[in-house]
Amino acid sequence: MTKTPSALSAPRATVPVAIVLLVLLPLILMPLSAIFIFAFRGGADDFVRALSSRDAQFALRFSLLIAFATAAINAVFGTYTAYVLSRYRFRGKQPLGIVVNLPVAIPTVVVGTSLLLLWGPIGLLGRVLSPLGLQPMFAPAGVLLAHLFVTFPYMLGAVKPVLDEIEGTYEEAAYTIGASRWQAFRWVILPALKGGLFSGALLTFAHSLGEFGATVLVSGNLRLRTQTAPLYIFAQFEAGNVAAANAVAAVLATLSFVIFFFLLRYTERRGR
Amino acid sequence: MEGTSLRWRGILPAVLLAALFAYAAWPWLPFARAERTPPTIVFYGFSILADAFHDGIFPAFQKTWAAEGGGRVEFASSFGGSGTVTNQIVMGVPAQVALLSLETDADRLADAGVIPRDSWKRLPNAGVLNLTPFVILVRPGNPLGIRGFEDLSRPGVRIVHPDPMTSGGANWAIVAEYGSGFRGSPGGAAAGEAVLAGVWKNVVAQASSARAARTQFENGFGDALVTYEQDAIYDRSRGKLHADVVDPPRTILSEHTLVVVDRNIRPRERAMIDRFVRFLWSEEAQKIFVRFGFRSVRSELDAANTGFGTIAAPFRIADFGGWKKARREIVDGIWKDRIMKAPVRR
């Protein structure tokens, strides 16, 4: 009566998979397809026209650049923070560990208002900076600040578990042959971190690309200046231009599909 | 073999990423930059203005400015609920010129020290740039037989309304609803409050701006929408209106106030901005507003648009003592303190 492993896995998958699909259909799959249906309802020509408008092109490019910058900066800051949290012992380490993870739970709108109340012209620091001609809010810098805040935990979350798992002995071996902390990090830890860095950066990139709640407050929503792709979608949808909104939404959805496709393939390969 | 295929698999995402970055950064790369960016006017406006400015006013002024030897000029613009726009300007967005739905919002800017008090009154026509009456949108064929705001207070009518916290249009609508009862027969304050209370008992959805409320209504919410006539008839002229417009016998003519935010204007931009502001009251600009469904402050120009409805007895905010008084007595005193705080009876 023993069953072969293949008999256990292969044919019986149909029912559970069907159940999952049935559950996901109204929750995720159908809403997603609505984006594409409405984006292409006017035909491919309308889709291309909607996408090639100056506002849409700017919004997409601006969002991508912010996402690249956010991913690059948080890759450095996040990794360093993870390294410090994982390698050093100090007072207040636990509260710090909690604080850096907070952005996951804080509503993004609150992130936006807090940034305004700090850097805005009537904010705590802004009041000092504004007379000097420095105005980070309602400018690309403000959008970047918001995105760095909101996506900070993703890099950390991807890198820290890997760091925690790396055997301390390799690092110690490096020290015994005279490596500095930087050398040990560069030649021992960094190679092992590659996977975590990659997936953390992709996650950060994807989240930045879709960020809305904080951005809408700090950007000033100026077309051709500070309007990101999600803000463009919202503005166009509110104005009743469903086709224009959905053309950009379809591009964002496709991009994040590609991003997560690579992410999954990569993590699966490593898991094997 | 395994090694090479692995390497190839790593190259594909890298190439994609590089291509994505090249696309994103393209306009900012030095060799792609054909010319220096021309001077820019930063314009903020309330929600329904987007098309009239984007497709009408901005291109027309660009032509005028070039013809007068000013060279190229660009516009950066943002449109939202009048209250939202006001809050953004108080918070410090770089708006140089803003068209607000309500004079109250201009007062709020003055209260916050952003612009000198009553500075807009020194503009032509005391700062009022254009007008439009408040009307009711109903489902095709008007199945509920709605003729005016009194009918909206009947039980069972489901109304989509912009939110008075952020929308200037919503504030106009409140005065329209109250005023319709107040100026009806027998009329008076009690009748005004009764209509207003009846309408608000029926509000089923609120949106941050008049334009957003319209989108909600178009997505199938509610039986009726209270909104600017401009928004309805401009879309009707383009065949995009899937609703009927009801012209109430008594309704308000909204007057929209322009403000110039001096603190965001650099000295070398001064002449350009002043010219733009003057241009807005020119016959050419006023004709553009009429084409896009606004009523002009020069009423003789209104004949050019055959889509305007007939309002039997329109009134203005001045009939209620101006916005300061109306805000205090009608919006805050009656709507906010009495109607919204009344226990919900369903």
Image (cartoon, coloured by chain):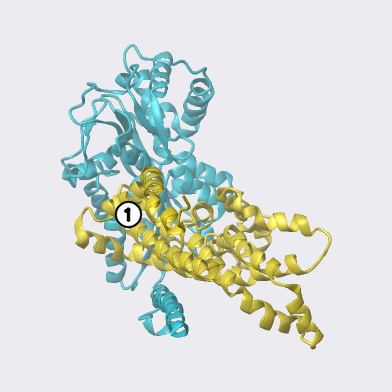
Chain colours: A yellow, B cyan
Q: Chain of mark 1?
A: A
Residue ID at (71%, 54%): A98
Q: Is residue B128 visible?
A: no
Q: Locate the N terminus of chain B by quadrant.
A: bottom left
**At which x and y percent is residue B301?**
21, 45
Residue ID at (50%, 33%): B324
- Number of numbered markers: 1
**At which x and y percent is residue B261?**
49, 55
Residue A178 against residue A189 in the figure, above or below: below
User: Given the image, on which type of amino acid does mark 1 rest?
Assistant: Asn
Determine which quarter of the picture holds residue B216: top left
In the rendered structure, the answer to whether residue B339 lies left or right of residue B31 reads: right
Residue B3 against residue A112 in the figure, above or below: below
Q: Is residue B194 visible?
A: yes
**Front residue (pair A49, A267):** A267
Element carrying mark 1? helix
Q: Quick one: which residue is furthest to the right in this view? A: A91
**Front residue (pair B113, B49):** B49
Q: Quick one: which residue is furthest to the bottom in this view? A: A177
In the rendered structure, the answer to whether residue A214 lies left or right of residue B258 reads: right
Crowding at dot 1, Cα within 10 Å, few <14 / some 14-19 / many 20+, comes out as many
Q: Locate the C terminus of chain B by quadrant.
A: top left
Q: Quick one: which residue is furthest to the front in this view? A: A1
Q: Which residue is mark 1?
A: A246
**At which x and y percent is residue A181?**
76, 80
**At which x and y percent is residue B2?**
45, 82
Residue A168 against residue B314 in the figure, above or below: below
Residue B314 against residue A32 in the figure, above or below: above
**Front residue (pair B290, A213):** A213
